[in-house]
């Protein structure tokens, strides 16, 4: 936890002694009276919170806010076929910390339908994963996340974007070119599409091509979905460093 991410901008905050944030501050960071911790408000400013340790175990934070800054994620949207819950958890954690601005998960033709019924999606866990990734990255802007019934719906939503956008899809089998940072051409935003564990169906490949999502590869080795996501994002994000 590199900063505390708050829902609203407040002048002060009191954390109960059993609040996980208070436990982390006391047991992991070992804060003392007068120490300062980093905070941010969702999609807004960062700040500093001055610590006061109370005798009942609670923590008071007196917060000073910095001016609001521009969005601190990259113009990269990630479309991913719903995979095993543990795989999707890793993707939410890592892709958020790497700076994607939007997630779209979809039920792929070769995906397992039961994965969508996981507690990851049926509870608030996916939101917490994203917020933890933002905090880990010492950022404040929180990416959106949507779920679609199929690739068709996810791509249809992408077509509604007004700004110029480059579409890219990863494929192990029919891609002829490696993914490079230069694949972005002149576009300032990119949508990266990654299939589930079992890959694309022929119908989905045809749909991607018709939707101007050319197929690229990450070399000859077959990678786990979460590894392919991190590898591809590293290449694409380097264009914005």
Image: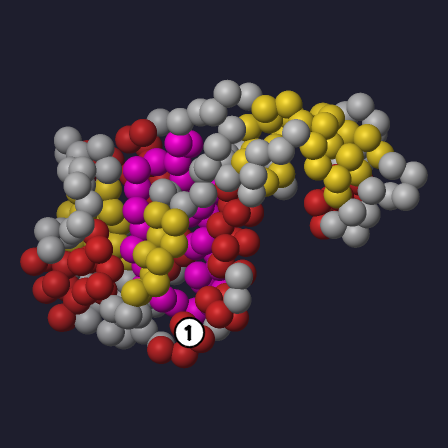
Which residue appears at 34% of the width and 63% of the height? 147
> Could you say whether the residue bearing mark 1 is in a helix, strand or loop?
helix
Which residue appears at 64% of the width and 23% of the height? 64
Q: Position of residue 107 (x, y in %)?
A: 30, 70
Q: Residue most toward the right?
A: 55
Q: Nearer the viewer, residue 103 or 57?
A: 57
Q: Nearer the viewer, residue 237 or 107?
A: 107
Q: Which residues are magenta?
A: 71-99
Looking at the image, residue 8 lies above or below residue 173: above
Q: Is residue 165 left or right of residue 25?
A: left
Quadrant of res 151 = bottom left
Q: Is residue 223 magenta?
A: no
The answer to whether residue 62 of the structure is visible from this angle is yes
Which residue appears at 43% of the width and 54% of the height? 91
Q: Is residue 68 left or right of residue 178?
A: right
Q: Residue most toward the left?
A: 210
The quadrant of the image that shows the C terminus is top left
């Amino acid at each position: 936890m590199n900063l505390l991410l708050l829902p609203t901008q407040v002048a002060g905050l009191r954390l109960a002694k059993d609040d996980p944030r208070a436990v982390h501050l006391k047991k992991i960071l070992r804060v003392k009276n007068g120490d300062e911790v980093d905070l941010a408000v969702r999609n807004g400013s960062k700040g500093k919170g001055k610590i006061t340790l109370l005798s009942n175990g609670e923590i008071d934070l007196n917060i000073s806010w910095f001016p609001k800054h521009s969005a601190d994620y990259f113009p990269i949207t990630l479309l991913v076929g719903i995979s095993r819950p543990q795989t999707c958890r890793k993707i939410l954690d890592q892709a958020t910390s790497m700076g994607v601005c939007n997630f779209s998960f979809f039920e792929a033709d070769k995906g397992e339908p039961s994965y969508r019924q996981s507690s990851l999606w049926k509870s608030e866990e996916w939101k917490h994963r994203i917020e933890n990734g933002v905090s880990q990255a010492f950022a404040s802007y929180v990416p959106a996340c949507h779920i679609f019934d199929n690739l068709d719906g996810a791509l249809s939503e992408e077509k509604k974007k007004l700004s110029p956008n480059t579409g890219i899809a990863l494929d192990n089998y029919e891609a002829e070119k490696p993914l490079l940072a230069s694949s972005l051409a002149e576009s300032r935003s990119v949508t990266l599409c990654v299939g589930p564990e079992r890959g694309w169906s022929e119908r989905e490949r045809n749909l991607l091509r018709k939707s101007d999502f050319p197929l690229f590869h990450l070399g000859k080795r077959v990678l786990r979905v979460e590894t392919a996501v991190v590898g591809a994002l590293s290449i694409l994000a380097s264009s914005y460093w």
